[in-house]
Amino acid sequence: MTFVQIIDCRTSRVEELNRLMDRWVEQTRGKRTATHSIVGTDRSDASHVVEIVEFPSYDVAMRNSQLPETDRIFREMVALCDEMPTFTDLDVVRDEALYKANARQMFERFANGSDLALLDGLLAEGYHDHDPANPVDTLGMDAVRREVEQWRAGFDFAFTVEDQIADGDRVCTRWSWKGTHVGDFMGLQPTGMEVTMTGTTIHRFRDDGKIVEGWWQYDLLGLMGQLGAVEE
């Protein structure tokens, strides 16, 4: 379940607080688990500052709070505030924009080399994947991780989300993919070639924002042709 923390403080040093947050983002690059952060000031009281930070789950947020950089920044933030900040912890039970954001995050986490355990915050344990390239459907988190690891072993790659359309509990994402062939993939030894591919994925979500089912369509034949495995 997505988790949100609201940090409420009063300070006359808003610009210094902003610079502190920028420094925290830079120092925790690659380690920070927050997925979205908003800082706002009260229109009727400029010294009243509220930060809203979103995480995939409470457990992931706790891992973030245990980073030494987070502890150091918190102590510096307290020094900038006129009084001790307050914290409100929220489990998100409904968010209309959540589905599209989580679909986008899934593509990012597949590609960016992050710990695949973080997928637990996005995919339901019994996730069901339909992929025409696989003779049988992929069922469950362990199978998804194995599938992603096979692609990571074969390519350094990244997705670009081109379009997203949401309707009810479904999100359709049109994406492009670019990779460098760096390892064995379907029996093909690494060529170092840069290759591209396009595709579309439809995801079905449950109420808490986790993805429970996915349907993939992508140009695997074209990819294999670029690698010389089939004739163009």
Image (cartoon, rainbow, N blue to C red):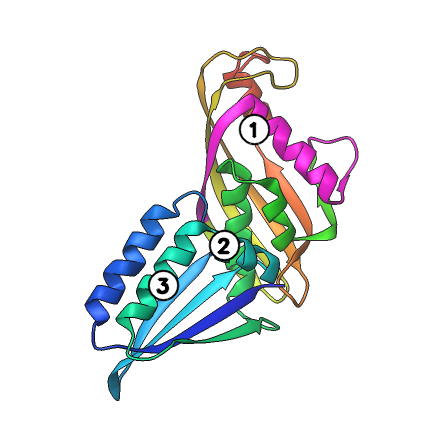
Residue 152: image tag:
1
Residue 172: x %, y % from top left: 56, 53
**What amino acid type should be assigned to the residue bearing mark 2?**
Asn
Q: Which residues are magenta?
A: 133-162
As helix, strand or loop, the secondary structure at mark 3 comes to: helix
Horizontal relation, residue 24 to residue 113: left or right: left
Q: Are marks 3 and 2 in contact (CB under 8 Å)?
A: no
Q: Quadrant of residue 137?
A: top right
Which-is-in-front pick, marks 3 and 1? 3
**What amino acid type should be assigned to the residue bearing mark 3?**
Arg
Residue 18: x %, y % from top left: 26, 64
Q: Quadrant of residue 81?
A: bottom left
Can residue 164 be seen from the camera position used here?
yes
Report the residue marked by disc 3.
Answer: 75
Q: Are marks 3 and 1 in contact (CB under 8 Å)?
A: no
Horizontal relation, residue 93 to residue 108: left or right: right
Which-is-in-front pick, marks 3 and 2? 3
Counting other residues with Cα less than 10 Å from the Cα at mark 3, is it few (<14), some (14-19), or many (20 or more)?
Answer: few
Residue 169 magenta-drawn? no
Quarter occupied by the N terminus:
bottom right
Which tag, 2 or 1, sits closer to the chain's start? 2
Report the residue marked by disc 2.
Answer: 64
Q: Is residue 4 above or below residue 33?
A: below
- Residue with the most extreme bottom position: 44
Which-is-in-front pick, marks 2 and 1? 2
Residue 101: x %, y % from top left: 50, 58
Counting other residues with Cα less than 10 Å from the Cα at mark 1, is it few (<14), some (14-19), or many (20 or more)?
Answer: many
Q: Which residue is depicted at the point 52% across and 24% down?
A: 155
